[in-house]
Amino acid sequence: MSWGEAFRSARDSLATRKLRSGLTMLGVMFGVGAVIGMLAIGAGAAAQAHDLIDRLGLRNVLIQSRTMRPDELREARKKSMGLSLRDVQAIEEAVPGVKLVGPRLKIEPWRIQSAGLKTDGTAYGVSPKHPAVLSLSLSDGRFIDERDNREHAQVCVVGAAIRRDLFVLGPALGRRLKVNELWCEVIGVLSASGNAASSGESPAGSLDRAVFMPINTTLRKLERDPLASPLDEVIVRLDEVVDSRQSAAVVKTLLDKLHGGVDDYEIIVPEALLDQSRQTQRLFNIVMGCIAGISLLVGGIGIMNIMLASVLERTREIGVRRAIGAAQGDVVLQFLVEAFTLSVLGGLLGVAIGVVLAKSVAAYAAWPTVVTPVSIIASLGVSVAVGLLSGLYPAVRAARVPPIEALRYD
């Protein structure tokens, strides 16, 4: 029997038993679909995590002010003033391998407005080094410089969405906007990040709704809680040759002394987060692989069951074929091709189900999903392998039926 004849025979056999063939393929379909859908969700989560870590900067160490209860904060301020410009200066002078240190103060504005227009956003007090620390780019104007910071200038740099909301299509440079009760002149506009709806949280989020002002201006001219830390974040950019984990340990030792041992800050090492993300992704892939194996195993059992039933039903047909000269290999090929066809069809339909599932999750849950070619190829490959292995035993059993007994079978 040729391969063409085997496939035509498989097609005719499956077409004769449409309902049973369809039910048999369900196990493979849902197994493959579930695997592709879950791997797409996992890949999307990994991509989002890696994007977040990239924005944080692999050569950065982030020091953030820790949120504390009011009673804890009052007690802490007896020994420590919190993150401050003093810490910035100490890190620049005492920690080896530091290229840049960027202080940041997040302001909680209840109002960002221009003449007659209002918008939502987040305001930050930053140093002139901020663009170098976070690799910011401007579409117009300039960033804050040392003179602005030294003279407590009331100037600002705005994100693309802030510029659009407050100044519409007109020019932004030289115009004024108000952050809370402080009027500032716009001296620069950031390049659009492509996510204007985001909160503007820096560095992890979109900058389209951010307003940057000189750090000294915000500390002196904007009201804030007297117990609050002067800075909410300090970003330390390291040389390429420096180990970020070791530098983080040195920074922690230094800050512990400056803060009197008060644990009012936390240190984040993006490089360590990346390693943890990769380890989590590997674990996720192993778990998904096990689930895939179980799902496809169930589908394989279904294929084996239907093929055994098919052998039993077609025993007399097998005997006739053997009697007129068909070899055992021809019978094995016939039933293996049927099992292969079931698994391939089920796998292809499962791929469609998986893609639809991934797209549905992305659309309705606002969760990024990534359907990779590797997941599709791997799922199809496993489903075909399971189908062939499941069909092998029934095929061999059919081939070993003695022709005389098969002809006598009723």
Image (tube, helix red, strand yellow):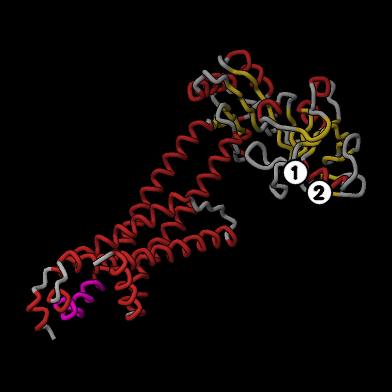
190 up-or-down from 322: above or below: above
Dominant secondary-structure state across the stretch colored magenta: helix
User: Among all residues in the image, which is located at the extreme bottom?
Assistant: 410
Q: The residue tagged with tag 2: helix, strand or loop?
A: strand
The picture quadrant where one finds residue 3 is bottom left
Residue 157 in the image, given as x and y percentages of width and height: 80, 34
313 up-or-down from 201: above or below: below
266 part of magenta stretch: no
Which of these two is toward me, 134 or 217?
A: 134
Q: What residue lies at 55% left-to-right and 45% top-to-bottom?
A: 48
Label 1, label 2: how far apart the Cα atoms are: 9 Å
Q: Left or right: 137 with respect to 400?
A: right
Q: What residue lies at 62% left-to-right and 18% top-to-bottom?
A: 99
Which residues lie in the magenta part? 306-319
C-beta proximity under 8 Å, tags 1 and 2: yes
What label does residue 368 carry, if any?
Answer: none
Q: What residue lies at 20% left-to-right and 80% top-to-bottom?
A: 313
Quadrant housing the N terminus: bottom left
Residue 223 visible in this rendered orientation of the protein: no
The picture quadrant where one finds residue 304 is bottom left
